[in-house]
Amino acid sequence: MKKITLIAALLCFAASFAQTSSKKVQVAILFDTSNSMDGLIDQAKSRIWKIVNEVGSLTYQGQTPTIEFALYHYGNDNLSSETNYIEKILDLTSDLDIISQKLFGLTTNGGQEYCGAVIGKSLQELNWSSSPTDLKMIYIAGNEPFNQGPVDFREECKKAVGRGVFINTIYCGDYDQGVREFWQEGATCSQGDYFNINSNEAVVHIETPYDEKIQTYNDSLNGTYYGYGGLGSARKQEQSMQDSNAEMEAPAVATERAIVKSKAMYSNSSWDLIDGVNSGAIDLDSAKEGELPEEFKGLSAEERNALFKSKENDRKNFQNKINELAVERQKFIDAEMKKRAEEGVVDDFGTSVNKSIQEKAEEIGYKKETPDIEE
């Protein structure tokens, strides 16, 4: 019997990694946002950065894949009946801050919950990879019968199988009730996994001696981000807002977000000068003065490049410090989890989903690696 505290189900929840690999991990999350699902959304907010870090351990032939995430919600009275009460909130993207922003913007409000229809929409509308070695996953969460609505989930399941997409279902309620209401069949028809959760269960966070220091380095890391172009100022504010959202959930959530920001997966080339230059999105030498951050204006080319190099080195230093502490932090958490298991107190977040993700990933050549600390 599989049971997880929600967002384990989102273990592949995530976003961009270094663009050095043609491999992809694509994940669509389909949330029921009817009135009874507030607990589900709260768990998702609390676990998003933990999930991203877990997925960040996947590599393919030594390279980190690009991860794309899409978000839908369904079963909400605010949505149109003509669309079967379904809305695509976010297309497949690698932008981590936008993923967090949209997740924290979800609200609940009654409605009709049509699982087959929302699965069909995600298969039809999203740009799924055609490569058989890319990992493609759908996670759908809810608590009403899976066979409701005008679209037969079994037919959509056939389409998913044809495109190599695994459908994983998360029933918010009793395991056997979920089986009776076709949530298990909704998963096994595509060789996906079925889970049940208590969506009203509070997430348990493990505080560690390393959290405060990681947050201190995160504050320093934020000082190395310089917005450029039309998006720069607003997106830097958005970065700060998502830091605040994580902190409001729990200190441990803020720490997980800081760890994500220390890795290559957290790339902001569309608005941050350092990421933009390193990705080729903007050229520091030919950029117009009006496009540059205030700190880089009015400088000679030599002064501008020297300042850039200094800030780039600062960022690498702070990221390495966070990564070093993150390794020790995880050792502390692993020991605490083992102790709780021995005492009969089981925090089963991620246990079942981690296993299922790793199994699916390994089948097509992915491995779980510990990222190296950059010199």
Image: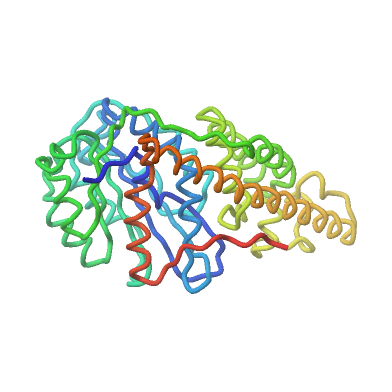
Residue sticking out furthest to the front: 342
Q: Position of residue 175 (x, y in %)?
A: 18, 39
The answer to which quarter of the image holds residue 86 is top left
Say which of 148 and 169 sits in front: 169
Q: Position of residue 31 (x, y in %)?
A: 31, 40
Q: Position of residue 241 (x, y in %)?
A: 58, 34
The answer to which quarter of the image holds residue 80 is top left
Q: Position of residue 304 (x, y in %)?
A: 85, 56
Identify the residue at image location x=82%, y=45%: 295
Report the number of numbered marks. Answer: 0
What sort of colour scheme is used for the picture?
Answer: rainbow
348 is higher (above) or lower (below) than 12: above
Quadrant containing the C terminus in the rendered view: bottom right
Identify the residue at image location x=32%, y=72%: 132
Say which of 116 and 291 sits in front: 116
Going by the image, does 145 lie left or right of 39? Answer: left
Going by the image, does 230 lie left or right of 154? Answer: right
Going by the image, does 161 lie left or right of 63? Answer: left
Identify the residue at image location x=54%, y=27%: 248
Identify the residue at image location x=31%, y=41%: 4
Quadrant containing the N terminus in the rendered view: top left
108 is higher (above) or lower (below) than 167: above
